[in-house]
């Protein structure tokens, strides 16, 4: 298959391109800059065909995809800076990327008759209660601009295409780009203790594991909305931080605090990010490994990157 991947300079897009190459698929990467600007680790993504593309430009999206003629598009590109998205001068740009950009991709996929996989988020829900969110739940109520614009992207995909996968993920970490683990490791080097939120509950997602699942899915016609995170149960950010420091062999202490006590975020965040993933197994897809195992492999990969 020829598969066009947006956002290849980001955490997930990088790993998706490598997974495609490992399976013999023809991956074509895209991102904003004229040349690939993600992690330069010598892997397949750095050698794959690359096309610069601004997804907010509808004509450019139509032209590029018409030229590439992919069998499928895996749409990883997004504005993900949740707090920055709340700034008045950034909101139009966030919507142009997450909502309008996704609409442009969906329109082009419809015209070409190709599959579309859209990567979405638990933030489309309001995060209330303690019951895991079902993939086909439509009780949307985003708490912030990021969640609202990602929901608008979901609705565009549903409206314009039939051969689609919408995959909601949460608490993502990968080698390329910023994430919670890297932040904890950096702060842990200079702090004896760190205050970390304990009343937001979910499960981490390692992009390396997720990429495998996404390619499993795109190779099929089992369309629909799915939830995908690593296995291992539901935890808080404080639980996650404690395990990070434990596995990294660091003595930094985690001080659990409530969201109200933390009060450093501009964007409201869901308390309940529990995502029900049973639909994956029901459709024959292998679940992702335990998040603790994923964390260990990720820390080893970070260590291997050091000079």
Image (spheres, grey):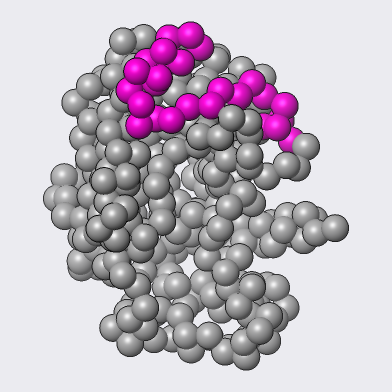
Q: Residue 285's x, y, as percent?
A: 47, 35
Report whether 39 appears left or right of 291: right
Residue 238, above or below 129? below
Can residue 278 be seen at all in this image of the molecule? no
Residue drawn at point x = 52 percent, y = 65 percent: 180
Q: Position of residue 175 (x, y in %)?
A: 64, 51
Asked whether 271 or 78 is in front, the reply is: 78
Residue located 40% across and 19% down the image = 60
Q: Nearer the viewer, residue 43 or 247?
A: 43
Q: Residue at x 48, y 9 (%)?
A: 67
The x, y position of residue 291, in whole percent, is 55, 59
- Residue 120 in the image, given as x and y percentages of width and height: 35, 43
Residue at 47% across, 85% down:
195
Position above or below: 135 against 161: below
Magenta range: 43-68
| Residue extending farthest front | 89
Quarter of the view holding residue 152: top left
């Amino acid at each position: 298959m020829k598969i066009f991947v947006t956002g290849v300079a980001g955490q997930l897009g990088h790993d998706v391109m490598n997974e495609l190459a490992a399976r013999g698929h023809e991956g074509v990467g895209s991102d904003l800059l004229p040349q690939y600007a993600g992690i330069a680790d010598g892997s397949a993504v750095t050698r794959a065909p690359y096309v610069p593309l601004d997804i907010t430009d509808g004509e450019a999206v139509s032209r590029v995809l018409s030229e590439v003629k992919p069998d499928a598009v895996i749409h990883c590109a997004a504005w993900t800076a949740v707090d920055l998205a709340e700034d008045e001068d950034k909101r139009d740009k966030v919507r142009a990327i997450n909502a309008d950009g996704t609409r442009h991709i969906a329109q082009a996929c419809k015209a070409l008759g190709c599959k579309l996989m859209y990567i979405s988020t638990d933030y489309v829900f309001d995060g209330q209660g303690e019951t895991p969110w079902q993939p086909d739940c439509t009780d949307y109520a985003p708490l912030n601009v990021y969640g609202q614009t990602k929901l608008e992207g979901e609705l565009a995909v549903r409206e314009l295409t039939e051969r689609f996968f919408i995959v909601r993920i949460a608490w993502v970490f990968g080698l390329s780009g910023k994430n919670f683990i890297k932040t904890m490791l950096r702060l842990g080097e200079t702090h004896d203790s760190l205050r970390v939120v304990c009343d937001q509950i979910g499960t981490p997602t390692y992009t390396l594991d997720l990429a495998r699942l996404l390619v499993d899915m795109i190779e099929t016609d089992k369309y629909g909305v799915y939830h995908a995170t690593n296995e291992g149960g539901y935890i808080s950010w404080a639980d996650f931080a404690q395990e990070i420091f434990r596995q990294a062999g660091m003595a930094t202490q985690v001080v659990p605090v409530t969201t109200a006590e933390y009060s450093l975020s501009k964007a409201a965040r869901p308390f309940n990010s529990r995502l029900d993933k049973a639909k994956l197994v029901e459709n024959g897809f292998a679940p992702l490994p335990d998040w603790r195992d994923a964390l260990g492999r990720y820390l080893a990969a970070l260590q291997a990157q050091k000079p």
